Image (cartoon, rainbow, N blue to C red):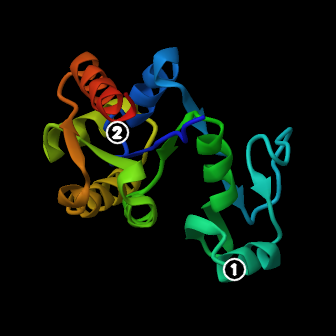
Amino acid sequence: MNKGKIIILSAPSGTGKSTIISRLMDNTDLRLGFSVSATSRAPRGAEVHGREYYFLSPEEFRTKVNNDEFVEWEEVYAGTCYGTLVSEVERVIDSGRNLIMDIDVKGALNVKKRYGGQALSIFILPPSVEELERRLRSRSTDTEESIRKRLDKAELEMSFAPQFDVRIVNDDLDRASKEVEDTIKSVIE
């Protein structure tokens, strides 16, 4: 059985990445699989170890970082880390499925560096920063401060876009979804 490919999608918040990934997951021809991330935080509610996350103690997480067992990881909040274990990547691609990863730009570039041609990195761009701001405001879920932070972060993230294999502007969700799908098909077939 052939190993699967690694498909990495990164984008600023509000760009439509989650919707695009949801559409991709519905396409069985793409043979997509998700990896389960690891975190150093405790489970919440009905979360189950190995389903939502691999829940590790901060010490276990640090040990795995020191042993180079993560393809990417980040301390998202003070003392709370999230990452993708090499073993999870291998589990999915060894099964012949193509791994889809929804990760931040720095993690995406680390995965690409580690897996080279076996990984395809795609960056989803908004049509403009102004349109991104309009989308974030139309959600009506964020405070003004939160919107400012998201926009500042988006501008930083977009500065990494040239380092990705493919850049797709989401000015029309159907067209952008199709373009991402066609790009993935071109590397898995």
Residue lying farthest to the bottom in this orientation: 66
Residue 30 visible in the current orientation: yes
Residue 27 visible in the current orientation: no
* Frontmost residue, 83 versus 165: 165
83 left or right, relative to 184 = right
State the image coordinates of residue 4 (x, y, percent, origin top left): 52, 39
* Frontmost residue, 71 versus 54: 71
State the image coordinates of residue 9 (x, y, percent, origin top left): 39, 44
Image quadrant in which the C terminus is located: top left
Give the residue drawn at x 28%, y 55%. Answer: 154
Residue lying farthest to the front in this orientation: 1
Is the residue 107 above or below the residue 64 in the image? above
Q: Secondary structure at mark 1?
A: loop
Is the residue 180 above or below the residue 8 in the image? above
The three-letter code of the residue at mark 2 reads Gly
115 left or right, relative to 83 = left
State the image coordinates of residue 72 (x, y, percent, origin top left): 53, 65
Mark 1 neighbour class, 10 Å CA radius: few under 14, some 14 to 19, many 20 or more: few
Where is mark 2, residue-wise?
A: 14
78 left or right, relative to 15 = right
184 left or right, relative to 50 = left
Marks 1 and 2, how far apart in space? 35 Å
Pointers 1 and 2 in contact (C-beta within 8 Å) = no
The three-letter code of the residue at mark 1 reads Asn
Task: Examine the image and state in which quarter residue 128 appears.
Answer: top left
Give the residue drawn at x 50%, y 45%. Answer: 101
Where is mark 1, residue-wise?
A: 67
Q: Secondary structure at mark 2?
A: loop
Image quadrant in which the N terminus is located: top right
